[in-house]
Image (cartoon, helix red, strand yellow):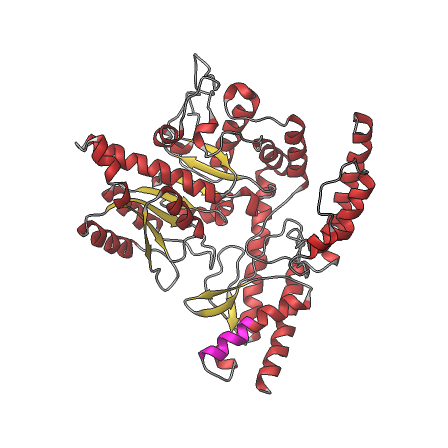
């Protein structure tokens, strides 16, 4: 493909993308293919000779498209949103154009410096404390800063590595030898609640520390008292607490942990406090949500995903640390083929030392496009629209009389179930009926959502957050919920 054909095919692909977005709401959001469908449709070896763009495009439409679950459909309410936007796509196109491998400053100075700039922009936009900024108000380098990770799971891993190094350094400062410090690594304990994302457990598995999972309270929150009790028990057993994760907007219910109380414990016990705000962190662009996040200014690290609810195509996970010393110290490996720039270092950040891989894409471009083309006002309007629609859905479900809300509706997530009093039967019957309702809604094909279990109780959890959704889509969701509930309850009564 030469430049002239690329111009032609590129324009065709943009038209194809635009057509897809204009029509995606007309098809069921959930794929219904069976496992292995694609293997039977594809050759079992790569082509020996070049194939035409037309043939590839035809296969996208006839073979790939049937196997796609349409996360960008306005009728997709599953898991949490995975926002896309045209500005972000344009930024990704520019990133693909440059196709850099930006492991240090000299690889492409603009890539490094733009990431430093936009992460400070974003940190200020969500109200982060100045400790997390890379550049201080006087223009000099700060101790903290932001970096774009691929996912919140990656962020979990790197901050837990930094936390381990911080704790081992403290033990050595207090007189422990290097050899003894290495020998106590297996005694390190990380603390999570039973609502913490699975990324925490995976990160602990990778770094080889122990995990203490603490039961959340009646509102599915991790509390100061529960954390203190777990730490006392572990210390009495000779273990070494070193890390705690507090969540701002859990996956199951969007609950907010006791951030201030957990920060108190982290301070007194010398724990690294990480705040996982992967979903709900985007809401902090709106000042009215910031009182809910009191305590984040005391954290060692904070993470949220603009690729969830802030109009930025996957992948773009924003991580800030208040002090990068332990992070960079733990992840820095010097080689002669990785030259360092001598002289002033305020903007010379080698982000390879802030992440697991060596290479990294120019992800800051798409975030820059989004923040400039939407502006802060546009991003705030995007968030507020979804919160308003979620509140409306909550009201409608309550007024219907057959449903109960299982967790406070604070952001765009509504967790509910059909009331036990409406279903004739025991606890198992109630759970089976609600689980069947999830299946019935998804089999209907007009909308897609997922269910969950809250301490053994089946519930439904539609997440409102589509970048293109309107109140009409939320109204359709409500209509499908009501219709399917009527059908499921009617069938249950006949059994």
**Image quadrant in which you'd find residue 88:** top right
The vertical placement of 4 against 85, above or below, is above
> Vertically, is 413 above or below 333?
below
User: Is 196 on the left-hand or right-hand side of 476?
Assistant: left
Residue interval drawn in magenta: 427-435
- The quadrant in which the C terminus is found is bottom right
**Can residue 171 be spotted in the picture?**
no
Name the dominant secondary structure of the magenta segment. helix
Magenta stretch: includes residue 429? yes
Above or below residue 75? Residue 122 is above
Indicate the quadrant containing the N terminus: top left, top right, bottom left or bottom right: top right
Q: Quadrant of residue 269?
A: top left
Q: Is 50 on the left or on the right of 208, as rendered?
A: right
Which residue reaches farthest top? 343
* Image-based side of 43 in relation to 339, left or right: right
Q: Position of residue 207 (x, y in %)?
A: 37, 42
Which residue shows up at 46% across the image and 44% down it?
Answer: 153
Q: Residue at x 53, y 58 (%)?
A: 413
Instruction: Give coordinates of residue 75: x percent, y percent.
Output: 66, 58
Q: Quadrant of residue 107?
A: top right
Q: Is residue 458 above or below residue 269?
A: below
């Amino acid at each position: 493909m030469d430049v002239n054909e690329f111009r032609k095919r590129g324009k065709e692909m943009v038209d194809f993308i635009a057509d897809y977005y204009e029509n995606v709401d007309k098809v069921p959001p959930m794929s219904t293919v069976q496992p292995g469908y694609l293997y039977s449709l594809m050759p079992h070896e790569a082509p020996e000779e070049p194939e035409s763009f037309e043939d590839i495009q035809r296969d996208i439409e006839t073979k790939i498209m049937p196997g796609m679950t349409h996360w960008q459909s306005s009728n997709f309410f599953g898991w949490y949103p995975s926002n896309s936007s045209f500005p972000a796509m344009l930024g990704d196109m520019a990133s693909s154009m440059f196709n850099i491998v930006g492991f240090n400053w000299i690889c492409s100075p603009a890539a490094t410096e733009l990431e430093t700039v936009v992460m400070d922009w974003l940190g200020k936009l969500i109200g982060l404390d100045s400790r997390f900024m890379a550049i201080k108000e006087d223009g000099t380098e700060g101790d903290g800063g932001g970096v774009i990770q691929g996912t919140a799971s990656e962020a979990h891993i790197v901050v837990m590595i930094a936390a381990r190094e911080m704790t081992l350094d403290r033990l050595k400062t207090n007189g422990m030898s290097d050899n003894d410090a290495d020998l106590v690594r297996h005694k390190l304990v990380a603390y999570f609640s039973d609502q913490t994302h699975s990324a925490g457990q995976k990160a602990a598995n990778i770094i080889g520390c122990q995990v203490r999972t603490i039961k959340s309270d009646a509102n599915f929150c991790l509390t100061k008292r529960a954390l203190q009790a777990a730490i006392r028990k572990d210390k009495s057993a000779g273990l070494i607490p070193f890390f705690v994760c507090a969540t701002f907007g859990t996956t199951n219910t969007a609950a907010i942990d006791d951030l201030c109380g957990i920060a108190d414990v982290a301070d007194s016990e010398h724990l690294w406090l990480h705040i996982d705000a992967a979903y709900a962190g985007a809401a902090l662009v709106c000042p009215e949500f910031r009182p809910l996040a009191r305590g984040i200014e005391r954290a060692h690290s904070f993470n949220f995903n603009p690729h969830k609810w802030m109009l930025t195509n996957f992948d773009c996970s924003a991580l800030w640390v208040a002090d990068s010393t332990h992070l960079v110290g733990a992840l820095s490996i010097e080689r002669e083929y990785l030259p360092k720039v001598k002289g002033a270092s305020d903007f010379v950040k080698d982000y390879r030392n802030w992440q697991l891989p060596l290479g990294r894409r120019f992800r800051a471009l798409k975030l820059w496009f989004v923040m400039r083309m939407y502006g802060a006002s546009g991003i705030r309007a995007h968030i507020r629209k979804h919160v308003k629609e979620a509140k409306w859905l909550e009201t409608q479900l309550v007024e219907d009389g057959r449903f109960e809300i299982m967790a406070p509706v604070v952001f765009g997530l509504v967790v509910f179930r059909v009331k036990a009093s409406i279903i004739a039967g025991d606890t198992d019957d109630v759970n089976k009926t609600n689980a069947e309702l999830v299946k019935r809604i998804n089999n209907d094909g007009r909308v897609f959502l997922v269910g969950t279990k809250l301490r053994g109780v089946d519930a439904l959890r539609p997440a409102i957050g589509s970048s293109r959704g309107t109140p009409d889509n939320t109204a359709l969701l409500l209509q499908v919920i009501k219709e399917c509930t009527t059908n499921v309850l009617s069938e249950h009564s006949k059994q």
